[in-house]
Each structure stands twice: as C-alpha cells, then as structure tokens.
Amino acid sequence: MLLFLSTLFFALATTVWALLAARILQGFSTAIVHTIGYTLLTEVVGKEHLGKAMGYTNMALSTGLLIGPVLGGLLYEYCGYFQVFLPAFGLIAIELMLRCMMVEKEKKHPVPVIPASPQLPATAGQPSYSSSTESDLLLSHTPKPTVRRVSAYGALLKSPRFVVAITSLFVLNSIANGFDSTLAPYAQDAFDMRPSRVAVLFLALAIPMLLAPLSGWLADHYGPRLPTLAGLAVGIPSLSSLALISQTSTTPLLKMVTVLAFVGLAFALAMGPLGVDAILAVHEIEEQSEPDAFGAKGLLAQAIGLQNTTIAGGGLLGPLYA
C-alpha cells in the first residue's frame, strides 16, 4: 500500500522537493517489498532450487528495467505524463491481490519425545502405574530452559562467507549502476552516437541477464563458487577492454556492444550465485547455533535486509564515483 501511495504522490507532484520526497518514499517501500519478497521466495523454494529461483528473479528484474523505460517513453510521447504511471498502478494492484492469496509456510520446531518407561507391577491394594507418569508430572512443573538470544546482525557480520558474498554484490552492483550515469554521456561525447545507438549499448548490457536461470541451475547442481568464478573470469578482462575503445577506434559501436555483452554475461553468471551463497551462509549459521537463538522466525529476514541494504549502497555509490 505504501508503494501505491508513494507512486501516486510522485505522479501528482509538481515541485522538485515533492518529487524528491516521493522518490524517498518509493525507495523505502521498495526496500520493504524486496526484503519480504526474497524472504518468502527463499522459504518456499528451499535450498535445492534456490539458485534457479534467484536466476529467474534476476532475469525478471532485468527484463522490467529493460522494458520499463521503453514503455514509459512511448506512453509519455503518445498519451501524456500521468498515463505513464498507469501500468505501475496496475502491477501494484496485481501484487496486492497475489499477496492476499498467498499462504505462508510456518516453521515447525521438533517436539522432544520422552521414551516410555516400563510399567511397574502393582502391589496389593494399589493400582499399577508407570514411571513415565511420574516423569510427566515432574516435567510439567519443571521450568523450560531459557534460550540465550544472539544478535542477528552480529552473527551475520562474523561469518566470513556472508560478508564476502554481500561485499561482492556491493562491488558488482556499483559497477552495474555506474554504467547508467556514464555510458550514455560518454558514447554521445566521444563517438557522437545518436540516442538509438546508445539504447543498443544498454540492450547489449541487459540481454545477457536472460541467462541468469542457467547460472542459478549451475549454482544448484555444482555450488555457487563455480558460476561466480566464471563470472569474475569473464568480467575482469571485459571491463579492462572498455578502456581500449577510444575516439580513434574503428567501428566503436560494434566493439562496445561486444564488450558490454560480455560484461552483462559476467553479471548474469555472478550475481545470482552470490545471492545464493549469502543465503547458504545464513543456513550454516542457523545450523551451528542453538534452536530459537535468533527468535521464532530465524535469521533469514535480517540477512536479506542486510543484503538488500548492501546492494542499494552499491547502487548509490556506483553512479557517484563513476
């Protein structure tokens, strides 16, 4: 509901400060939706299919980022300003309906079973009884042991595996968002490219994300390390090759499209498995801790919230230093 209201506020805003406030509210509501959405996704699919699910999710996000500006531009040119927001309102309404129809899975904690004791023989004038009856009576008056609660964020930040995963996501996301602020101005200034050709560059960067489910499948079957290393092995030389394309280069558009396609492939290979590795680190922490040490809901929501915060930090810092 907050996402709907903030989007409506943005559509009706007429001053710069109102637009800024609306964007802040949109970012706040989007952070909540992302955290809850990824948490529910992880709980529903389980560890066995987590990589594939993350791959499809990243593919859907990239497709939305690819189609959204094109659709918005067409609606603005042929229909008007407010009509640009109508698809967003429709998608938010569909999301609310789907959320109301969804049934959440509850965590089931194992109940300790007390083995039955043999029945004691009855004596004259006394009924027979078992020792389990006495133990049940004693247990009913025994106070439950208190579980020592552990700081969720402290446990997460003490895990090298989790910290490395979210730091890598921060770096990759900052690089990806850096292209948003530098690619178009550089292509227009250095090569005098028309907007249509600049759009081709962004398509080359985004289309490889369609391979994200394949990367997730690799993470499910061979672990997240293999596709992550493959993505980094592709991304490092590809990013370095961008520096070789200068104003004196021949066919700069073809060269930039080729190199950016490999950069997009690197993002598709690495980003999903890194998210999977962070979630697996969370399960590892929970398995090594006492039951209910992080509360009834566990550690997953805090971990995904911290992961999304790190990704958002990369999205904020990337365009600034680029």
Image (cartoon, helix red, strand yellow):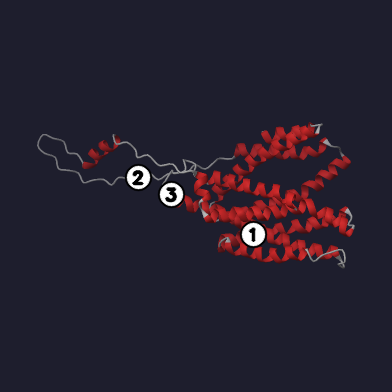
Say the numbered circle drawn on residue 289: 3
Residues under numbered marks 1 and 3 in contact, where contact means CB atoms less than 8 Å apart: no
Say the numbered circle drawn on residue 89: none
Say the numbered circle drawn on residue 270: 1
Amino acid type assigned to the residue bearing label 2 in the image: Pro
Residue at 62 percent of width and 39 percent of height: 99
Relative to the observer, which residue lies in front, 174 or 120? 174
- The mark that comes first in sequence, 1 or 3, is 1
Residue at 11 percent of width and 34 percent of height: 125
Q: Which residue is the extreme one toward the left? A: 124
Q: Position of residue 129 (x, y in %)?
A: 19, 39
Q: Which residue is the extreme one toward the front? A: 321
Image-based side of 290 in relation to 49, left or right: left
From the image, tell me which residue sits under label 2: 112
Q: Is residue 222 above or below residue 202?
A: below
| Image quarter in which the N terminus is found | top right
Residue at 87 percent of width and 59 percent of height: 190
For the residue labelled by badge 3, is the local secondary structure a helix, a strand or a loop?
loop
Residue 52 shows in this picture:
no
Q: Position of residue 166 (x, y in %)?
A: 60, 52
Amino acid type assigned to the residue bearing label 3 in the image: Ser
Q: Quadrant of residue 171?
A: bottom right
Q: Is residue 164 above or below residue 148?
A: below
Relative to the observer, which residue lies in front, 89 or 199? 199
Q: Residues within 10 Å of mark 1 (few under 14, many from 20)?
A: many
